[in-house]
Amino acid sequence: MFDENPYFAGFTAWEQMIARMYDMWLIGMGSWNWTQSQMENALRIQLNQYQAAMSDLTIMAGKLGEQVNKNQIAIVQALEDAIVSETKAGAK
């Protein structure tokens, strides 16, 4: 009935246009959803890498502190030995 009436012929074109616009909107939203998912995954990967790097850095700083402490003890011991040997040599 509507197809036969010339007054309603324009509505068919509008209906098709709105259907296509809705399809394009769905494609755009799907694209946005995919982009958001990719960004979330990239952020998750970056945070995991940052956490691993911080853990490694903490371990390395602890080992460095231990090595510095050992070196300082060795230097102090060497100085004490040098002073003691000089003192003994000077006393003779």
Image: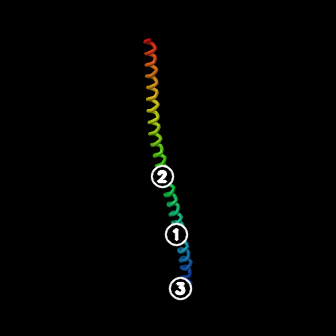
Tag 2's secondary structure?
helix
Q: Nearer the viewer, residue 65 or 54?
A: 65
Q: Nearer the viewer, residue 10 or 70?
A: 70
| Callout 1 amino acid | Leu
Tag 1's secondary structure?
helix
| Callout 3 amino acid | Phe
Residue in view at x 54 percent, y 72 percent: 23
User: Which dot marks residue 48?
Assistant: 2
Q: Nearer the viewer, residue 20 or 89?
A: 89
Residue in view at x 44 percent, y 39 percent: 62
User: Which dot marks residue 26?
Assistant: 1
Which residue bears the numbered disc 3?
Answer: 2
Residue in view at x 45 percent, y 32 percent: 70
**Position of residue 9 measured from the top left corner of the image (x, y, whole percent):** 56, 82
**Position of residue 17 measured from the top left corner of the image (x, y, whole percent):** 55, 74
Give the mark nearest the N terminus, 1 or 2: 1
Position of 6 with respect to 73 (left or right) is right
The quadrant where residue 73 appears = top left
Instruction: Tell me whether circle 3 and circle 1 mark residues in contact (CB < 8 Å).
Output: no
